[in-house]
Amino acid sequence: MPGTGDHVEKRGFNPRQAPKSQRRSYDSKFKLAVIAAAKETSTKAAARKFDVESKQVREWRKQENKLKGAHATRKSFRGPKAGKFPQVEAGVVDFWRKARSQLCSVSRRMMVREAIKIARSQGIMNLKCSLGWIRRMMKRNGLAVRRRTTIAQRLPMEYEEKLLSFQRHVVALRKRNSYLLGHIGNDQTPLYLDMPSRTTVEKVGTKSIQVKTTGNEHVKGDQDGPSCYSGRDDEFAPAPGCICQ
């Protein structure tokens, strides 16, 4: 039998391994309470009362103005750091702002292409516009991918001129190839002319997110398709060919 003075080692206990102290986080409300107690007594007395380090109390007293203006549940003031290429980020944000001012949808891929374009124009060749970079850039500028809430419809720009241009194109082809009017017609087929994106990059917290379209995203019925012609007028006529522009 072991003697009374013999050391009995517990299973799983390593005497060489010191216990690790747990890191704890404190919100602004708790820190302000500690600061108030430190003002009434002393830094060390407040540290003992709230079971914190004196060093922490001194740091919190330096941040008193920030803590008073912060939310009660905020625990730190780290926030997003500045990027390595602020001039590129400023150009991308300006591109996003101009597009969204016209209610156009902006994707992260569009912002990546714009960032590469700006970086090349400024001679920056070591910028890797990865998905992680664009995410951090968006976070630094308060942006996020948001789902649209409404659709603002509009007609395409210069749509009248485009219609006239197509008509002139068909007339010119008819004159050049001597097409008969009876051989020119319009086919009908169900079309989805415009499918707007369901998401766009937008400011965090924005309530209404609009995306402009041409108004054709709900088209499901038969629509006039491209003008077609047939070179022969008999039962052996070949398949019609498109002369759309």
Image (cartoon, rainbow, N blue to C red):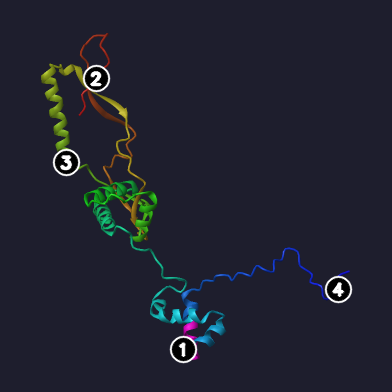
Pointer 3 local density, CA inside 10 Å: few below 14, some 14–19, many at least 20: few
Q: Residues within 10 Å of mark 1 (few under 14, many from 20)?
A: few
Under mark 2, the amino acid is: Gly
Between the C-alphas of marks 2 and 3, the distance is: 27 Å
The residue carrying pointer 2 sits among few (fewer than 14), some (14 to 19) or many (20 or more) residues within 10 Å by Cα, namely few
Q: Which residue is mark 4?
A: 3
Which of the marked residues, 1 or 4, is nearer the chain's N terminus?
Answer: 4
Say whether disc 2 or disc 3 marks the residue closer to the N-terminus.
3
- CB under 8 Å between discs 2 and 4: no
**First in sequence: mark 3 vs mark 4:** 4
Q: Nearer the viewer, residue 97 or 38?
A: 38
Tag shown at residue 196: none
Q: Secondary structure at mark 1?
A: helix
* Residue that appears at 17% across and 36% down: 162
State whether residue 117 is above or below residue 57: above
How many angstroms separate mark 3 from mark 4 (CA)? 102 Å
Asked which secondary structure carries label 4, the reply is loop
Residue denoted by label 1: 39
Would you say residue 229 sits in the magenta stretch? no
Residue bearing the label numbered 2? 241
> Magenta span: helix, strand or loop, mainly?
helix
Q: Are marks 2 and 3 in contact (CB under 8 Å)?
A: no
